[in-house]
């Protein structure tokens, strides 16, 4: 049984609409990427943010009013006609929602507690805002659908896991359409947490560069509407693993990452040589890039691959869906692939050679893309998208 993508939308430092994102992918510029004050004590930090005003939540949904949910709403309104059509066609009870996040409304809680401690006027706050399940609860309330809904929280693979879970719901017959995706917004707790682990770079991240010294955190959101009805974009293969090597460090040989990639290829009945491009997890931390390079070499030998995180930042739990939306847009619009940028830094020649894309204006030779999203605890996902 095949599963297809009928509509999708995302927001990130690259932009808020498909047109803006496509334009910035072509020029490899990210208007939302710049140093920002107030997230770390005593210094600015390079962060990727979503620029511009976001839609307000409708009256009656104030307990869901977090920036995460506003980002989701901004994505949803771009594809709402398609979602409403599915609701009318299948009925509210046959529509499922699966989201992924690692922060939910944590920033709203932080601001509320700060205001309380400083005896400042309090903003409206509800405990539900910070619940991880609030993303799916909000979308179900907004759309008035009653099918199975839940939120996945597996750190940086969360929204990719949400897509995998959504595919399973469709294949099980529990629903006829599923809205999958996720969101994560800038928040002091994860930013300071990653900084305490010495995983945050003071400058723009440099995936697979000799000088790489950590991640650039970003925020973003993405949604995809999946059904069994044929369309131009197919979810062709799924892979997932949990090697549990270490709570925060990847397996040094990329064992779990390699397993997820092989599983995705097997489920799609494809050979490594069939994949035209791999969107790498590529966080620019020293251990993650080496582990992924090692796994890529073992699975693919050499292929065409790059990380887009220097344009979006690492959007944590949203990174899986944000980057899958970039892959879907690339397939839909036949966009040039994003090369790895070594204009400021140098390629790390000590990493296994696996085919990092360096040339500009390279386009897909076949409409098949794999996207990787890996997380703490050895939680790994690989998803293959196929275009018409």
Image (cartoon, grey):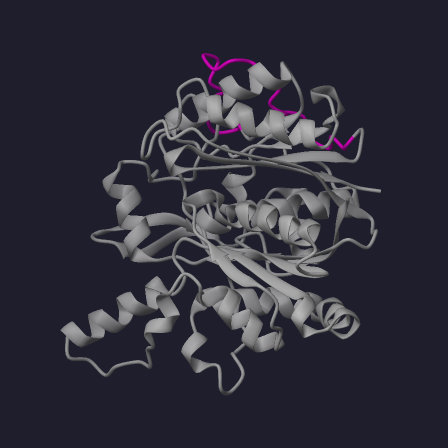
The quarter holding residue 199 reads: top left
In the figure, 133 relative to 302: above or below? below
Identify the residue at image location x=51%, y=72%.
138
Per the image, is 101 magenta? no
Q: In this view, does 15 lie above or below 280?
A: below
Which one is in front, 149 or 280?
A: 149
Q: In this view, does 186 lie to the left or right of 54?
A: left
- Whether residue 378 appears in this view of the structure is yes
Magenta span covers which residues?
342-364
Residue at image point 83% right, 51% down: 230
In the rendering, at what x and y percent does residue 222 appear? 58, 56
**Viewport quadrant of the N terminus:** top right
Whole-percent x and y of residue 242? 45, 33
Give x and y (percent) for residue 62: 44, 81
Is residue 50 at all visible to an observer of this figure? no
In the orientation shown, which residue stands out farthest toward the bottom? Answer: 59
- Magenta stretch, main secondary structure class: loop
- 120 or 359, which lies in front? 120
**For this view, does 18 lie left or right of residue 222?**
right
């Amino acid at each position: 049984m095949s599963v297809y993508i009928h509509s999708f939308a995302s927001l990130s430092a690259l932009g808020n609409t498909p047109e803006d994102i496509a334009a910035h992918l072509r020029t490899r510029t990210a208007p939302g990427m710049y140093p920002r004050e107030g997230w770390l004590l005593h210094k600015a930090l390079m962060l990727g943010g979503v620029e511009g005003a976001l839609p307000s939540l409708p009256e009656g949904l104030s307990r869901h009013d977090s920036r995460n949910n506003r980002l989701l709403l901004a994505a949803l309104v771009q594809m709402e006609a398609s979602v409403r059509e599915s609701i009318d066609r299948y009925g509210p009870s046959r529509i499922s929602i699966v989201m992924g996040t690692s922060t939910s409304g944590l920033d709203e809680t932080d601001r509320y507690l700060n205001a309380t401690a400083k005896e400042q006027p309090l903003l409206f706050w509800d405990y539900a805002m910070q619940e991880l399940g609030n993303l799916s609860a909000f979308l179900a309330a907004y759309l008035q659908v009653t099918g199975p809904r839940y939120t996945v929280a597996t750190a940086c693979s969360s929204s990719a896991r949400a897509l995998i879970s959504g595919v399973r719901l469709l294949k099980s017959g529990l629903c006829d359409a599923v809205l999958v995706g996720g969101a994560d917004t800038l928040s002091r707790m994860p930013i300071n947490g990653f900084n305490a682990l010495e995983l945050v770079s003071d400058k723009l991240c440099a995936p697979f560069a000799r000088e790489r010294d950590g991640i650039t955190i970003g925020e973003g959101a993405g949604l995809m509407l999946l059904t069994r009805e044929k369309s131009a974009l197919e979810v062709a293969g799924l892979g997932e693993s949990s090697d549990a090597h270490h709570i925060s460090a990847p397996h040094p040989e990329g064992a779990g990452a390699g397993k997820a990639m092989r599983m995705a290829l097997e489920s799609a009945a494809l050979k490594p040589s069939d994949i035209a491009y791999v969107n790498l997890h590529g966080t620019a931390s020293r251990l993650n890039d080496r582990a992924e390079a090692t796994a890529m070499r073992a699975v693919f030998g050499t292929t065409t691959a790059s990380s887009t995180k220097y344009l979006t930042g690492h959007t944590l739990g949203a990174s899986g869906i944000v980057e899958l939306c970039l892959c879907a847009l690339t397939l839909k619009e036949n966009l040039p692939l994003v090369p790895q940028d070594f204009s400021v830094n140098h390629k790390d020649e000590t990493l296994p050679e696996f085919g990092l894309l360096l040339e500009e204006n390279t386009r897909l030779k076949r409409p098949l893309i794999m996207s990787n999203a890996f997380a703490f605890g050895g939680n790994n996902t690989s998803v293959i998208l196929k275009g018409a």
